[in-house]
Amino acid sequence: MLGAIEAGGTKFVCAVGDETGEFAHSIQIPTTCPEETMAKVIEFFGQYDIDSVGIGSFGPININPESKTYGYITSTPKIAWRNYPLLQTIKDTFGVPVGFNTDVNAAALGEATHGAAKGLDSCLYITVGTGIGAGAVVQGELLQGHSHPEMGHILVRRHPSDAYTGKCPYHVDCLEGLAAGPSIEERWGDKGINLVDRKEVWDLEGYYLAQALMQYILILSPKKIILGGGVMNQSQVFSSIYKYLPELMKEYVSLPELSSYIVSPELGDRAGITGSLLLAHRALIEEN
Amino acid sequence: MLGAIEAGGTKFVCAVGDETGEFAHSIQIPTTCPEETMAKVIEFFGQYDIDSVGIGSFGPININPESKTYGYITSTPKIAWRNYPLLQTIKDTFGVPVGFNTDVNAAALGEATHGAAKGLDSCLYITVGTGIGAGAVVQGELLQGHSHPEMGHILVRRHPSDAYTGKCPYHVDCLEGLAAGPSIEERWGDKGINLVDRKEVWDLEGYYLAQALMQYILILSPKKIILGGGVMNQSQVFSSIYKYLPELMKEYVSLPELSSYIVSPELGDRAGITGSLLLAHRALIEEN
């Protein structure tokens, strides 16, 4: 039996299942402090005979297996979790192989294996919610190098009519600073859910996301782009992206039909936990 | 013996050698029309007993092995080469395995194997010359997906004092449109070589390249960045990049010391042909 943890900033999802993406049981645990949250995580997995665990975690995290702090959550604003050895805690407790990557890389793996990019060895998974993050599968492997991608913080060109300052504590008006959920709320003075009828809100959102997609496409050339997260529940944003992306790209590269190329996650909010289960499977295979 | 072709817009470099990157012989052939150029390419390799050939080509090219037009040069402005079956011509003539990729992906492979990124499974190779192009090695494999990267055309934010329009026939003021060699010449009214003492020229160049590197780092997280091409012979540009990149990145991601992270090609102008030789070696191994 495989164990999976999707470690998020507000909740941990824990599940057991197999590599087909079928879950036997799952549970949600609020993210408080490591002592409290992890005790419940360990209690959950203690009920099962697990062969390995996969973790898709919020970040930034250390995913370099050669580093002394491999498997740590690193410089997160959640002080209690800063420098917490997430991987090692699970490994020490259960004595099984543990796979470890970002939540968004795990989600990309889930979608590439059982979701919208099934059968493809390449996809990009982007979540647009309280922050903007992305993960990718490149030639069947999770994208990583010096560290994991931090695609939400790329720079975009400001729309000439957009006077909103931006909300990123690092870069002010990077993509996340201009287009994540909290920025939408601050710019327009109301929660996204109350702005459904304001066309200009979602048009501008698509304008910024189309710019980001242009950069991602020119740099990574993914075979499928999956856009999830709370903001993308506004399907108007997809329409806006389909409008702006060709205007920006000027037919420089030939792309598949956009409505089948840039899509919603097929696994919905299970992409991350499904990918974590697959990380467990990969860890098990690698160890044997 | 392995054969290698670096197919460039002005010349084809052909060489024979082995996977250690040692060349027995090499030749340069002007890029005129396919009939003329390819006759000389074939004549050169006809002298040797070659086991496979690797091609690093100017683009855009089709690198999808499942496509009917795999190995073609596609929508190049060089009319005579448009839709030319470069891979197939070599394969049909010599009946050996042929590896095929972009010139910049080949250069990245060369540098990752025998050059500045030796021993690393990840690097980004960027050339800044008459155009801007980039290739990458990601977890040991050449970066490709739906197609090959076209990183030179990403959007950058204009410097407030830069009134130059831009020169990209597609996007006008994308990175290539603002920062490739011909743009430098047009903006400042003289060839780069005559502008060596104009500090502001190279400062601005570094400003745009630092922005591009920020995007590449946030998206790909390469373990080493190699900047080649004629423009990078102005070492002042490196200084400017080292200045602007941290200002833009705001310590959001931790990077290695920049002067050892962002470097010149160790193989100089042999990066592409060395990588092409390695493509030949990979093609040979895959076929057996």
Image (tube, coloured by chain):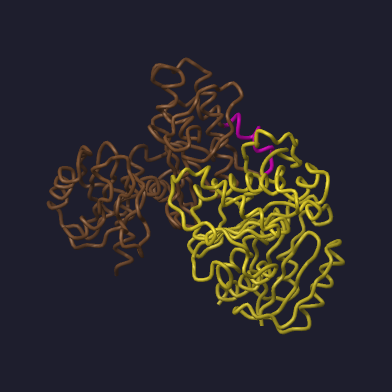
Chain colours: A brown, B yellow
Determine whether, in the image, residue A4 is placed left or right of residue B179: left
Q: Position of residue B219 (x, y in %)?
A: 50, 48
Q: Which residues are magenta?
A: A242-253
Q: Nearer the viewer, residue A28 or B243?
A: B243
Determine whether, in the image, residue B200 is placed left or right of residue B253: right
Task: Work out whether B144 lies above or below B205.
Answer: below
- In the picture, residue A96 is in which quadrant? bottom left
Q: Main secondary structure of the magenta part?
A: helix
- In the picture, residue A252 is in which quadrant? top right
Q: Residue at x 56, y 61 (%)?
A: B142
Determine whether, in the image, residue A266 is placed left or right of residue B232: left
- In the picture, residue A7 is in which quadrant? top left
The answer to if A243 sits in the magenta stretch is yes
**Quadrant the C terminus of chain A occupies:** bottom left
Q: Residue at x 55, y 72 (%)?
A: B286
Q: Residue at x 61, y 24 (%)?
A: A160
The answer to if A256 sits in the magenta stretch is no
Q: Position of residue B247 (x, y in %)?
A: 52, 43
- Number of labels in the image equals 0
Q: Residue at x 30, y 67 (%)?
A: A287
Q: Position of residue B16 (x, y in %)?
A: 71, 79
Task: Work out whether B133 lies above or below A199.
Answer: below
Task: Work out whether B110 lies above or below A160.
Answer: below
Determine whether, in the image, residue B281 is placed left or right of residue A141: right
Q: Position of residue A4 (x, y in %)?
A: 26, 50
Q: Nearer the viewer, residue A73 or A242?
A: A73
**Quadrant the N terminus of chain A occupies:** bottom left
